[in-house]
């Protein structure tokens, strides 16, 4: 007699938990522990048909280690391949770091909601990011820059703990060199090097000094919880309405499709109702993120 | 989701005690797996001869081997029926490495038709409640396939003990939610009523095992069911709607913020729960270059459940984790899916070695929810959550 404790044999049919296979086509070491992988679907049809929106995320498989949740760090305006950026902190990210160009990994997605970029047409866009929190913001930055004439002023305030923790260095330089972007880069006090010619100061402080105008503007904020916490009052002081401030929540997830229960906060399933929330929506949630 | 179409409850027929074994044999011969509650298999021929079941009173739902009939009497199976739909651990697919390439390997497992006999009504109702989360937007294929392949006959419950509270969450010891038919114990056998086409088809296919139900037995069944409903109603009475709204508006209330005082975070409550459905997805390697991706039961009661890679944990103490359990079952799920995520089976209270008792907790929340001044505070500040 058997209870159904373990179903050892996989079923014959597909499930929503089965990833699509992707090939690593390029990799960039952003910092000593942060890497960007550029990925291409093995399936040609999928390579053509795959579409997503800025802010959506995926479940990335390193076979043998499991799955991890990251945003899609490349913009939807650049189809053909997608990129993810991750810090090596655990089992899956360590295994992903072992992958070389040509190796195979898995992807499920795109999941979740997105930044309402289309609603921002004609508006000024302010990006505020800290550390690896630039990854989801980078997707939106490029999405906006690829459609540059649809938007007003673009301001980017980005900071990291130290010069060595800044990610997407080449792109930071590219954005700083553009006449149609105001780029402010900062590192936390003590994180500067002798050659550093950017600002020194915490992101919320620098944001207050830069003081971008809030009129006809929206703000996208992503970074460590502490940075988000202290940036909100600064934006509030600058006159940004909570409805015009957006962030993306990082929660531990497994299924990504609203079943496994892990990312539930109050009445919200972050994987389905998020990960993008306005400050208004965020403030209505229990503080469990 | 169950493809079964609801029909009006058919007039009961009668299954005599002596026909049960033959019915089970016929179902099996027709190709169905028959599931029923039994004690564990005897550990040895001597134990079998002595009538000893391994593990003593360990009553569980099992796939019955030929010649074994389910125990259609009182007794709460240790685990609910959910494992037959969401196994404790389940292979989703296999993978195999070929150099730089990876191949996804599906298996050959197919879901056989299954008939479950004598399921607790609280366990059957849970299936229909969990159907909601398994099918919003994305449909969970393994769950749905098993649901579609399974015909569930419940057994009207006599009420186990003071931990039972199905009536408080809108169910009853003779509820037919999630079931295709209902058995009621009467003198000499069981009354059988079907509530779906799937259930009626099983009775029709084995019509010779059933007889017309004598009116006296129908009356006997009705009376025992009425008495059971009365007994369970006395265990707990809450206004589930007020509880739902009060929890949503009082996230930081001391009553909710201190719920975990006894809890050790072992998660036994989630294991035995018919509606807890949270799971983990893990890779298991088998030697080098191959392995299986599995999903397995998980629980919001462990710290690891929400732990971020950075070390930050949004629910970093047991109070927060136990509040999540209560919040999810009695407020979040009802507000999202229109269903209380609890069927009042009472297993969590019975199994908890620390004495966490949902009956006690719900009664306390209900008192708070009904207190006019707290209700007014919740409404006035627009909810603290």
Image (cartoon, rainbow, N blue to C red):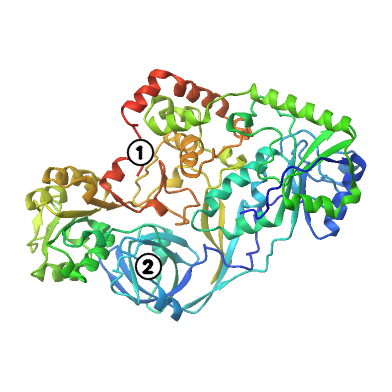
Which quadrant is the C terminus of chain A positioned in?
top left
Q: Which residue is mark 1?
A: A286
Neighbours of disc 2 within 10 Å: few (<14), some (14-19), many (20+): many
Nearest the viewer among B69 and A226 is B69
Closer to the camera in the image, B53 or B320: B320
Residue at left 49%, top 37%?
B325
For marks 1 and 2, the one nearer the N-term is 2
Q: Is residue B373 above or below residue B312?
A: above
Residue, x 63% and y 29% (percent of image)? B167
Judging from the image, mark 1 belongs to the subunit labelled A
Query: Along the horizontal axis of the image, is B294 left or right of B113?
Result: left
Circle 2 residue: A97
Q: In front: mark 1 or mark 2?
A: 1
| SS for callout 1 | loop
Residue B191 visible somewhere in the drawing: yes
Q: Residue at x 32, y 59 (%)?
A: A114
Residue A65 bears which disc, if any? none
The residue sitting at 74% across, 58% down in the picture is B113
Q: Please report, as a chain letter, where disc 2 is located.
A: A
């Amino acid at each position: 007699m058997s209870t159904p404790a373990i179903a050892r044999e996989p079923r014959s049919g597909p499930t929503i938990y089965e990833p699509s296979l992707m090939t690593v086509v390029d990799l960039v070491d952003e910092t000593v522990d942060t890497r960007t992988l550029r990925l291409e679907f093995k399936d040609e049809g999928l390579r053509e048909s795959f579409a997503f929106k800025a802010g959506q995320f995926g479940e990335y498989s390193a076979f043998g280690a499991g799955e991890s949740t990251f945003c899609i760090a490349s913009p939807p305006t650049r189809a053909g391949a997608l990129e993810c950026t991750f810090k090596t902190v655990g089992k899956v990210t360590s295994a992903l770091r072992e992958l070389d160009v040509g190796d195979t990994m898995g992807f499920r997605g795109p999941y979740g909601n997105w930044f309402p970029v289309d609603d921002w047409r004609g508006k000024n866009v302010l990006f505020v990011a800290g550390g690896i929190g630039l990854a989801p913001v980078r997707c939106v930055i490029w999405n906006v820059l690829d459609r540059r004439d649809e938007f007003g002023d673009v301001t980017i305030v980005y900071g990291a703990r130290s010069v060595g923790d800044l990610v997407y260095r080449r792109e930071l330089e590219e954005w700083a060199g553009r006449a149609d972007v105001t780029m402010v880069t900062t590192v936390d006090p003590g994180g500067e090097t002798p050659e550093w010619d950017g600002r020194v100061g915490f992101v919320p402080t620098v944001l207050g000094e830069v003081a971008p105008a809030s009129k006809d503007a929206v703000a996208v904020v992503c970074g460590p919880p502490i940075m988000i916490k202290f940036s909100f009052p600064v934006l509030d002081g600058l006159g940004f309405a909570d409805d015009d401030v957006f962030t993306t929540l990082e929660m531990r997830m497994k299924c990504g499709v609203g079943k496994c229960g892990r990312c539930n906060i109050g009445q919200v399933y972050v994987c389905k109702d998020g990960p993008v929330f306005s400050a208004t929506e965020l403030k209505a949630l229990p503080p469990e993120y | 989701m169950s493809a079964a179409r609801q029909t009006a409850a058919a007039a009961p027929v009668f299954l005599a005690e002596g026909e049960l074994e033959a019915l089970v044999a016929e179902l099996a011969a027709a190709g169905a797996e028959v599931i029923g509650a039994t004690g564990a298999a005897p550990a040895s021929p001597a134990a079998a001869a002595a009538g000893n079941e391994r593990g003593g009173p360990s009553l569980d739902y099992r796939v019955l081997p030929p010649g074994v009939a389910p125990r259609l009497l009182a007794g709460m199976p240790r685990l609910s029926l959910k494992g037959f739909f969401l196994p404790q651990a389940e292979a989703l697919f296999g993978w195999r490495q070929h150099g730089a390439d990876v191949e996804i390997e599906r298996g050959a497992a197919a879901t056989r038709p299954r008939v479950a006999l004598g399921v607790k009504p609280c366990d059957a109702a849970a299936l229909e409640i969990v159907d909601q989360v398994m099918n919003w937007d994305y449909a969970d294929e393994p769950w749905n396939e098993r649901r579609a392949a399974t015909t569930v006959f419940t057994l009207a419950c006599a009420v186990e003990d003071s931990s039972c509270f199905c009536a408080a969450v809108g169910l009853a010891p003779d509820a037919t939610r999630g079931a295709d038919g209902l058995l009621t114990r009467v003198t000499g056998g069981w009354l059988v009523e079907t509530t779906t086409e799937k259930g009626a088809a099983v009775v029709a296919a084995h019509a010779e095992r059933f007889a017309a139900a004598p009116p006296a037995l129908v009356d006997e069944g009705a009376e025992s069911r009425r008495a059971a409903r009365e007994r369970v109603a006395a265990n707990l009475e809450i206004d589930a709607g007020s509880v739902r709204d009060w929890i949503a508006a009082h996230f930081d209330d001391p009553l909710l913020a201190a719920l975990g005082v006894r809890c050790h975070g072992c998660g036994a409550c989630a294991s035995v729960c018919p509606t807890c459905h949270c799971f983990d997805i893990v890779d298991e390697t088998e030697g080098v270059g191959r392995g299986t991706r599995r999903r397995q039961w998980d629980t919001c009661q462990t710290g690891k459940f929400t732990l971020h890679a950075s070390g930050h944990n949004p629910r970093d103490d047991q109070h927060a984790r136990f509040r999540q359990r209560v919040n999810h079952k009695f407020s979040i799920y009802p507000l999202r899916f229109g269903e209380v995520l609890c069927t009042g089976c009472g297993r969590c209270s019975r199994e908890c070695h620390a004495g966490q008792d949902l009956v006690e907790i719900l009664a306390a929340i209900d008192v708070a929810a009904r207190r006019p001044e707290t209700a007014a505070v919740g409404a006035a500040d627009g909810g603290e959550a």
